[in-house]
Structure formats: C-alpha cells, structure tokens
Image (cartoon, grey):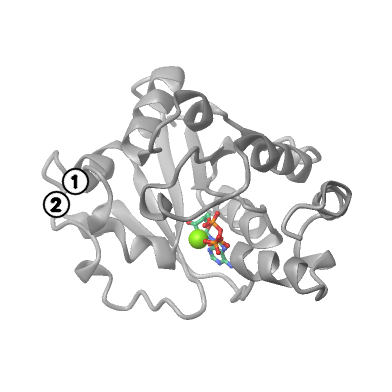
Amino acid sequence: MNLRFGILGGTFDPIHIGHLIIAEEARHRYDLEKVIFVPAFVSPLKAEIECSSPSHRLKMVELAIEKNDHFSVSNTEIERGGISYTIDTLRETREIYGKDAELFFIVGADAVREMLKWKDPEMILSECTIVAVSRPGFPLDHLEDFIPKRSSDGKPGTERVVIMEIPSIGISSSDIRQRVATGRPFRYMVPEAVWSYIMQTGLYR
Ligand code: ATP
Ligand code: MG
C-alpha cells in the first residue's frame, strides 16, 4: 500500500484541542503515516484580518504536538511568504514524499463550504483526498454545492471528498482570542504548554 500523509492547514492563532482531535481522528480513520500541521503565512480568505506573528503561531503548534510522534509541523507556507495557497503546499508536499504518496487534506466544514473560492480547486482534488470534518454550525448535507463537479483529472468531485463525522467541538481560535482579551477562561481549550505560552507572552490580551 502507498504511504498516506495527512495535512492540516490553518492559521492556528492559537492552535486548540479541536485541531488535535481532528488530526488524530483522521490519522486513525485513514491509516495515515503522520499528520503534518502547516501554519499559513497569510490565509487567502483572511488576508484582511490581523493575526499573530508567524513565529508565535509556529511555536504554539510545536508545543502542542511535541508529545505525539505521528504529528509534525511544516514551516513551508511561512518560508514561502505571500498568500498561502493550498495547491502550492500540496505540490511541495508531493515533491517531498513522491508521486505514489497519498495525500489527505484535512479541512473543517466551515472551510470546505468555501472551497470554490480557493485557488485551483479542481487541481486540488486531483492532488489529494479532502477530509471534510463536521463542525457545529456548518452543515455538510449539500456537499456537492460546495465542491468542484470534477477534479482536473476527470474524477467526480464527490469521489475525492470524504466526510469525517466527529463529536461536535464548539471551540474556535477566534473565541479563544476573545476569551483571553476579556479575561474569561480558556485553559483547557488548548494544550497545557500552549496555555502557559499565551500567559507568558501576553498574546491576545
Ligand atoms: P479562527 O476562528 O481564527 O478561524 P479556527 O478555530 O477556525 O480559528 P483555523 O486555524 O482557522 O482555526 O482552522 C484550521 C482548520 O481546522 C480549518 O480547516 C478549520 O475548519 C478546522 N477546525 C478548527 N476548529 C475546528 C473544530 N472545532 N471542529 C472542526 N474543525 C475545526
Ligand atoms: Mg477558521
């Protein structure tokens, strides 16, 4: 069997337990060798929104995943600079792992519903399988409305996207940022080391 790799892209501002839960679930369900977390330099659909520096976001991902041997972090989008397009990251990942590697791009339902606004969505579907993860507030029951009809190599879009139902996690980075800013609790929404990092650096205050 070809080796399978998961990729979880995001802003990770900050990384939270939702990200870790979906990565671990996907790893188990699709037999992934590992899951690579890829913090964006600038997320295409968030270009106008201010976020923390790449070094803070990268550091928090490193702290969050350090105890899991099946998780790794890639700074490729940060190094590349500019707007971070998924298609570029998929191609770079394929260059590293070879043409036989099977890539699984893990995306929450909110992001999948925007897929037609991504750069080269048909091409993305021929490079990887999209793992669309359930997320409260973002129904996926009209999936075909949100994804390309076909991949650039001619497969039906619905064959290239799998839905991964998980127990609902109502946690988001934006809610955590707001909690920090207004002095409400967030401690167990992020791994302990990330909590300490946020407290020490004064991020989001
Ligand atoms: P923000 O509120 O700043 O957008 P976020 O919690 O959505 O933060 P991102 O870094 O934007 O975190 O997300 C990275 C990826 O993880 C996206 O594909 C997103 O849909 C997915 N994701 C994040 N939180 C969850 C969750 N609670 N359930 C399912 N998927 C999630
Ligand atoms: Mg988000």
Quarter of the image where one finds residue 153: top left
What separation in Å lies between label 1 and label 2 (alpha carbons)? Answer: 6 Å
In the rendered image, the vertical position of residue 7 relative to residue 189, given as above or below: above
Residue at image coords 34%, 31%: 88
Q: Find residue 150 and name its label.
A: 2
Tell me, yes or no, whether the two marked residues, 1 and 2, touch with CB atoms within 8 Å: yes
User: Could you tell me which quadrant the N terminus lies in?
Assistant: top left
Residue of label 1: 122
What x and y, as percent, mark residue 151? 17, 46
Residue 188, percent from left and from top: 82, 66
- What is the tally of numbered marks visible in this picture? 2
Residue lying furthest left = 154
Q: State whether residue 92 is above or below residue 59.
A: above
Image coords of residue 56 (percent x, y): 69, 40
Kindly identify the residue that appears in the image at 21 percent across and 68 percent down. 144
Q: Amino acid at mark 1?
A: Glu
Most foreground residue, 117 or 37: 117
Tell me: residue 36, above or below residue 148.
above
